[in-house]
Amino acid sequence: MNKLLIIVLIAAVMHSCAQKPQSVSKPQEHISVAFDADSAYHFAAEQVSFGPRVPGSTSHRLCAEYLEHTLQRFADTVIVQHGSMPSYNGTPMPVRNIIAAFNPSATPRVMLSAHYDTRPWADQEQEQEKWHTPIDGANDGASGVAVLLEIARQLREMNTTKGIDIMLWDAEDSGTPQFEYSANHDSWCLGSQYWALHKHKAGYEAQCGILLDMVGAPDAQFQLEQHSRQYANHILKEVWKTARRLGYGDIFTDKHAYPITDDHYYLNQAGIPTIDIIHYDDIRGFGSYWHTTSDNMDHISRHTLGAVGTTVLDFITNR
Ligand code: AHN
Ligand code: ZN
């Protein structure tokens, strides 16, 4: 064998070796995301500016139209589901769910959701005169939707090819008021209950669901809630790991919370493994202003909206 041939062979072997590690197991590149907390804050303020979004009211209808038109700017398709469910006292409650899809035929699908209606009663107020006042619902309602609208805006910007649905539930928060004598536990989450009975697409499936509820308080804490642990622990662990990596470990805590009746319960029952990112702390429960007239924009934090939005967008982008 002549020298030249040996050199060529050695070069060929070295070349193939150098190529190998790359072609065999190239580590997936981590994509960093650009969730804009100011934009999310603005989306919350816009909803609140319509007034309380009590099902059946004009403010509710105008806000629903605003949400539908806003999602039409970002998503590929938007479907509005109209229906009715019996309320806590048996009277029919109108339901209007807003469902936006990115890449509607792509699988597997991720379902992100939040409720957009607000509670007709400030029934956690100390003073009885305030119990019948409808609330702004800046945190309880607008915050979760605001984070999802900003995620939708970013998904459009990123030109995502993933299958993602954003569902805005109606009639979550008209469950039996505190001042009634008997409680009907199925009187909450009427929008998601309606959807579970009448899916917008026959045979619809999602591999992963994330519900956002009360994600805007300055002192927000999210705990590992029991229904989420039972039905979707793998998702819960991954989302919390993402939050910790991003430096939000102080908000996404390792404490366990008791099972909470929220839209994710009915979604899990319908076969979609769904976690709930919901404000719950051991001292104030659902937060200081929960179901009071003080649940307004004065108590919404850009930092918390950013922590949740960045975590969820990073998780769905890099999963
Ligand atoms: C109950 O209070 C039964 N569940 C909490 C779900 C909720 C109310 N989320 C917002 N408001
Ligand atoms: Zn509520």
Image: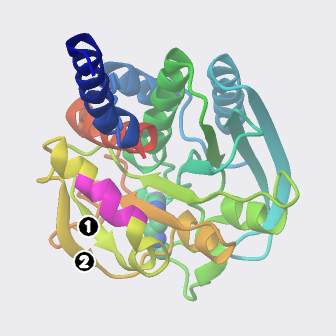
Q: Which residue is at the front of the view, 75 or 26?
A: 26
Q: Quadrant of residue 229?
A: bottom left
Residue depicted at x 58% and y 88%: 182
The amino acid marked with disc number 1 is Gln
Residue lying furthest bottom in this view? 182
* Left or right of 207 in this view: 288: left
Q: Quadrant of residue 127?
A: bottom left
Tell me the residue that label 1 is attached to.
223
Residue depicted at x 21% and y 34%: 303
What SS does tag 1 mark? strand
The amino acid marked with disc number 2 is His
Name above or below for residue 38 compared with residue 247.
Answer: above
Q: Position of residue 38 (x, y in %)?
A: 31, 20
Name above or below for residue 203 compared with residue 185.
Answer: above
Picture disc at residue 256: 2
Q: Position of residue 65 (x, y in %)?
A: 72, 28
**Local crowd size for mark 2, using a 10 Å CA cut-off: few (<14), some (14–19), many (≥20):** some
Magenta-colored span = 235-241
Asked if the magenta segment contains residue 293, the reply would be: no
Residue depicted at x 64% and y 31%: 63
Answer yes or no: is residue 192 visible: yes
Q: Are marks 2 and 1 in contact (CB under 8 Å)?
A: yes
Answer yes or no: is residue 219 visible: no
Q: Position of residue 21 (x, y in %)?
A: 29, 38
* Mark nearer the N terminus (2 vs 1): 1
Q: Quadrant of residue 163?
A: top right
Tell me the CA gap for discs 2 and 1.
Answer: 6 Å
Name above or below for residue 125 compared with residue 45.
Answer: below
